[in-house]
């Protein structure tokens, strides 16, 4: 199926031809309908978070209204926090059952989504433990400890097979799939290894996603890296990563950018003005990516002038960001060092 194209009211041919959607996590479907005019005017889609408790008549009516208005509707299934929230190696069986039930419910009720988003992130409790650390050293050590504990090749391969089967099942029903992945997973996907995916409990490689969307959130990369990275560095990472993804995956390459509002972690740093977000969007377009997702819809709707954010994003044009020599050198070194290290660890931890 073709990507969603801009079909707004303007006949201005200067608009870029790219898919634009908004992640909507902390806003319910009827509230999303309140933004229908903005979404329709700017030909933007929405990825609505849905949970096991979301299968209600009120939400169904909201989904139908969005579909009737021609809005690209993406279901973004998430679990309860005590069950990991995101799909992963430890909850894949239950997650798959939830997704199948959700899709069948939507199809029975004439509210089938255009796309289904699989948000592959480490278990939410691990992320809370890491981000809740009181100092940078504790945060780094907690992250490394979680990654080490997650390594389980056989469990990883089982989860990957289950996820591949689920993806095929969804696509057979005429629903495209988009996989949102962590930044470091996106970098690993440039090559052929799956060590970081195993360490993150997020199998991605080798599955026939329609779109792969690394979450290159500039505000988080800037805010959580301390003095190690600033917004210029983060925007160059967006450009460089998008270039590599586009080279390997072609039109399947996407990107998720932000943040405009805090999410489930509650304290994520956010952009103050649309111009700050626009740098990353322009960088992705300059790299050839034509599928852009922005986190989050509710963050923009909470601003004084939400329409200005929509207008700025839809009018984005390709522009290479200011180069970061530090990031360029770091990525070059990582791409040289990582493959032999990954081969060694994968050999050592191979299933027997």
Image (cartoon, rainbow, N blue to C red):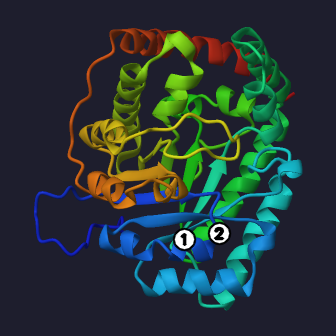
Q: In the rendering, at what x and y percent does residue 334 appear?
A: 50, 13
Q: In the rendering, at what x and y percent does residue 219 appear?
A: 49, 32
Q: Nearer the viewer, residue 122 or 322?
A: 322
Q: Residue furthest bottom?
A: 109
**Cβ atoms under marks 2 and 1 closer than 8 Å:** yes
Residue at (70, 40) in percent of width and height? 265
The quadrant of the image that shows the C terminus is top right
Residue at (75, 21) in percent of width and height? 143
Q: List the residue tagged with mark 1.
A: 32
Residue at (63, 69) in percent of width and height? 170
* Callout 1 secondary element: helix
Distance, label 2 to label 1, CA atoms, is 6 Å
Q: With respect to residue 236, does 141 lie above or below? A: above
Q: With respect to residue 224, does 21 lie above or below? A: below
Q: List the residue tagged with mark 2.
A: 28
Residue 218 makes an appearance in the image: yes
Q: Nearer the viewer, residue 346 or 273?
A: 273
Q: With respect to residue 29, does 61 lie above or below? A: below
Q: In the rendering, at what x and y percent does residue 168 appear?
A: 63, 65
């Amino acid at each position: 199926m073709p990507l969603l194209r801009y079909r707004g009211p303007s006949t201005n041919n200067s608009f870029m031809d790219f898919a634009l959607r908004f992640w909507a996590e902390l806003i319910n479907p009827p509230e999303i309908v309140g933004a229908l005019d903005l979404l329709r005017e700017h030909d933007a889609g929405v990825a609505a978070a849905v949970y096991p408790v979301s299968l209600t008549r009120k939400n169904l009516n909201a989904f139908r209204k969005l579909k009737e208005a021609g809005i690209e509707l993406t279901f973004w299934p998430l679990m309860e926090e005590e069950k990991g929230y995101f799909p992963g190696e430890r909850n894949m069986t239950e997650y798959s059952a939830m997704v199948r039930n959700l899709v069948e419910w939507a199809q029975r009720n004439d509210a089938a989504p255009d796309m289904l988003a699989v948000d592959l992130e480490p278990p939410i409790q691990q992320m809370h433990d890491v981000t809740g650390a009181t100092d940078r050293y504790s945060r780094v050590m907690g992250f490394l400890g979680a990654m080490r504990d997650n390594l389980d090749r056989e469990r990883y391969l089982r989860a990957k097979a289950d996820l591949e089967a689920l993806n095929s099942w969804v696509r057979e029903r005429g629903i495209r799939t988009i996989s949102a992945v962590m930044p470091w997973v996106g970098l690993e996907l440039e090559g052929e290894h799956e060590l970081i995916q195993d360490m993150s409990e997020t199998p991605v490689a080798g599955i026939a996603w329609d779109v792969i969307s690394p979450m290159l959130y500039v505000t988080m990369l800037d805010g959580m890296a301390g003095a190690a990275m600033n917004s210029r560095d983060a925007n160059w990472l967006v450009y460089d990563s998008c270039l590599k993804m586009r080279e390997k995956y072609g039109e399947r390459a996407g990107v998720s950018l932000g943040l405009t509002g805090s999410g489930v972690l509650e304290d994520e740093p956010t952009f103050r003005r649309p111009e700050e977000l626009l740098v990353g969007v322009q960088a992705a377009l300059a790299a050839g990516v034509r599928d852009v997702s922005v986190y989050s819809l509710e963050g923009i709707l909470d601003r004084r002038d939400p329409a200005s954010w929509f207008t700025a994003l839809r009018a984005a044009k390709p522009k290479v960001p200011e180069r970061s020599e530090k990031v360029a050198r770091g990525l070059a070194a990582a791409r040289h060092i990582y493959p032999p290290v990954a081969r060694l660890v994968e050999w050592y931890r191979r299933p027997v």
